[in-house]
């Protein structure tokens, strides 16, 4: 694909659709900017934000995992459904996703190790671990000072981290 800086508005409309570009055209008309320049700026800032999000995901993943290892005494805490109740009769999605990750690791002819499983978990899995349904199991383990807790967050309220709908 041509470098976006050298692309014309017509190129972008052909590649991504006129509907997608309408936001940029409208903004360009209101601001006096060029629609292509706005699109390129948005693309670059999105890339920069995704890099930061990826770093935050790794930090979150490692933090939660360390707390759950400490709480359960197991490096494969994600298999401790009796303790954490990840899966229920109504939903086995978490356990199914772990099984899929392990299958993919084996398919790559690698040994299934906790670090590989944990790094294979998508952001959605980590967000699931922080839902209200797991407050009495996972959240309690995360904030428990015995496990390292959250020393810079004395309230221990999970609901503060919920996004408003």
Image (cartoon, helix red, strand yellow):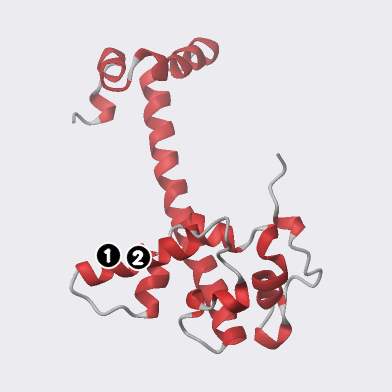
| x 57%, y 61%: residue | 89
| Residue 74 spot, x, y in % from top left | 51, 87
Residue at the spot 27% in from the left edge and 65% down from the top edge: 104
Give x and y (percent) for residue 136: 72, 70
- Element type where label 2 sits in the image: helix
Quadrant where the N terminus is found in the figure: top left
> 1 above or below 145?
above
146, 95: nearer the viewer: 95
Q: Is residue 62 above or below residue 125?
A: below
Please identify the quadrant where the C terminus is shown: top right
Report how far apart the C-alphas of labels 2 and 1 lie in the structure: 5 Å
Judging by the rendered image, the residue that carries numbered circle 2 is: 101
Could one spot residue 81 in this view of the protein? yes
- Marks 2,1: beta carbons within 8 A: yes
Q: Within the image, what quadrant is residue 103 found in?
A: bottom left
Viewer-side residue, 20 vs 85:
85
Task: Choose between 10 and 88: the one closer to the eye.
Answer: 88
């Amino acid at each position: 694909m041509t470098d976006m800086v050298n692309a014309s508005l017509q190129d972008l409309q052909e590649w991504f659709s006129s509907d997608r570009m309408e936001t940029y055209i409208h903004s360009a008309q209101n601001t006096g900017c060029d629609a292509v320049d706005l699109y390129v700026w948005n693309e670059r800032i999105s890339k920069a934000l995704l890099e930061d999000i990826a770093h935050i995901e790794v930090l979150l993943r490692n933090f939660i995992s360390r707390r759950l290892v400490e709480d359960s005494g197991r490096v494969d805490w994600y298999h401790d459904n009796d303790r954490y109740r990840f899966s229920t009769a109504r939903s086995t999605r978490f356990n199914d996703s772990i099984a899929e990750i392990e299958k993919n690791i084996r398919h790559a002819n690698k040994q299934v190790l906790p670090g590989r499983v944990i790094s294979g978990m998508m952001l959605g899995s980590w967000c699931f671990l922080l839902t209200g349904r797991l407050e009495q199991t996972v959240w309690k383990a995360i904030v428990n000072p015995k496990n390292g807790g959250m020393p810079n967050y004395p309230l221990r309220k999970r609901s503060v981290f919920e996004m408003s709908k």
